[in-house]
Amino acid sequence: MTINNWLSTYVQLCYKDEARINSDFVYSQFSGQLFVNLVQLLDLATLDVNCLKFSYSVLAATCVYVACSKRLALKVSGLNESAITPCADWMVHFWEILKEEVAERRNRLTLPPGPSKKTYLDESHT
């Protein structure tokens, strides 16, 4: 699995209570904007050679950790804090840079809402 696959899985689990399932398919229920923000963080962080110290699953979980919350990252990843903390200490600086660039990222305390009827089929994040 790639880092983006891990990230997509973790973000989907963040919104698992909103999942819509029919008999053939599970529809993505996460915020496309959140996913884009996390992928931008991941893209910036992976430009640093120090990202090679961490596994893909840890890098993806750390994106959720620094951008959303520690509790949520530990819950969706199944990892323990000692596995994520070294990566979070390294990655938080990249998140601070991104937060300066986009005002909507500043001081977010909750997850953005999942898709509504209006945005349900929006796949712009892919």
Image: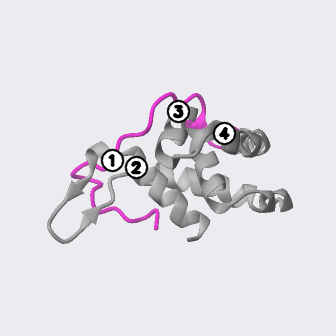
Q: Amino acid at mark 3?
A: Arg
Q: Residue 121 lies in magenta, yes or no?
A: yes
- The residue lying at 54 percent from left, 41 percent from top is 73
- The residue lying at 48 percent from left, 59 percent from top is 8
Point out the tag, 3 or 1, that comes first from the N-terminus: 1
Image side of residue 99 versus residue 111, left or right:
right
**Inter-mark Cα distance, 2 to 1:** 5 Å
Q: What x and y, as percent, mark residue 59?
A: 66, 54
Point out the tag, 3 or 4, that comes first from the N-terminus: 3
- Asked whether the beta carbons under mark 2 and mark 3 sit within 8 Å of each other, the answer is no
Residue that mark 1 sits on: 16
**Inter-mark Cα distance, 3 to 4:** 20 Å
Q: Residues within 10 Å of mark 4 (few under 14, many from 20)?
A: some
Residue that mark 2 sits on: 13
Residue that mark 3 sits on: 71
Give the prevailing secondary structure in the magenta stretch. loop
- Asked whether the beta carbons under mark 2 and mark 1 sit within 8 Å of each other, the answer is yes
Under tag 2, what secondary structure? helix
Numbered tag placed on residue 99 in the rendering: 4
Q: What x and y, as percent, mark residue 70?
A: 58, 34
